[in-house]
Image (tube, rainbow, N blue to C red):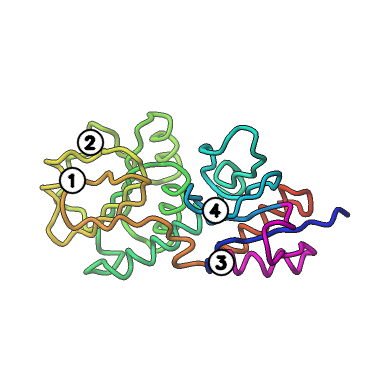
Amino acid sequence: MEHLVLYIPILTNPLLHAARILADSGVEIASDPESADYLLYPIPTPLSALEDYCQGATIIGGNLDFLNESVSRIDLLKDPFFLADNAAITAEAALGLVLANLPCAVTEGQILILGWGRIGKCLTHQLEHLNAPVSVFARKPEDRALLRSLGYRPIGWEGLADHIPEYRCVINTIPAQVLSDEDARRLRGDCFRLDLASVRSIPGEGVLHARGLPGKYKPESTGKLIARTILHDLGRVNV
């Protein structure tokens, strides 16, 4: 089996957990970048983090399209296995924020989820298991049909504004503005507004724009996911 040497320039909590798992799996964690075959960076990876990049090493990180085409890379944010599990971790962390900030029991407050992507699916599933009354906005008719067939409450553009004043919580997962400024003004004053998108997409004041939830609230699970994905991509384990 090939001997792998990896260096971690920035030791965040998730990467610290990942390093332990990788080391236990036979990957050598180097003390300097010069001797490493792979460099593992935080996910997503800012350009400013690549100060220790050594020519010839493979970059492991996320959102690496800014790299020159000649640079070898493993972009975890393009890995479908990573994205699926990361969405579940993100949803669980978001659920914790909802439970902590709702002024009422989760079973008593109407909740609106904007988006039926990976995170939207996981959140809907988790909230339904708590018997929370959840409505899901989905742009595509086929997604609304699937929501309906699964027993969920779908909403399209035509019905989005109908129940705005009733919602106690709005969670956005779409990187585009769905609620109009007027919709946002019609929300209850105590409505908890949580924006999980990569860009701010819920208009108005009092919105919690929460990014990087897995690493912040679930560093151990995030580190385990990072390590498992790397080992899979390097041919060491099956996902």
Q: In the depicted view, which residue is nearer to us: 52 or 133?
A: 52
Give the residue pinned by disc 2.
159
Query: Which of the two labelled residues, at mark 4 and mark 1, occupies the earlier sequence position?
Result: 4
Q: Residues within 10 Å of mark 2 (few under 14, many from 20)?
A: few
Q: Amino acid at mark 4?
A: Glu
Q: Amino acid at mark 3?
A: Leu
Q: Secondary structure at mark 3?
A: loop
Check the image and report above or below for 129 versus 68: below
Q: Secondary structure at mark 2?
A: helix
Residue for point 13% across, 56% down: 188
Q: Position of residue 198 (x, y in %)?
A: 37, 46
Q: Residues within 10 Å of mark 1 (few under 14, many from 20)?
A: few
Lateral position of residue 64 relative to residue 3, left or right: left
Lateral position of residue 114 relative to residue 91, left or right: left
Query: Which of the two labelled residues, at mark 3 and mark 4, occupies the earlier sequence position?
Result: 3
Cα separation, mark 2 vs mark 4, equals 50 Å
Label number found at residue 11: 3
Query: Which of the two labelled residues, at mark 1 and mark 3, occupies the earlier sequence position?
Result: 3
Q: In the depicted view, which residue is nearer to us: 54 or 120?
A: 54
Give the residue pinned by disc 1.
163
Q: Nearer the viewer, mark 2 or mark 4?
A: 4
Q: Amino acid at mark 2?
A: Gly
Q: Which residues are magenta?
A: 14-37
Q: Position of residue 121 (x, y in %)?
A: 45, 47
Give the residue pinned by disc 4.
51
Label number found at residue 223: none
Cα separation, mark 3 vs mark 4, equals 14 Å
Cα separation, mark 1 vs mark 2, equals 8 Å
Residue for point 34% across, 57% down: 210
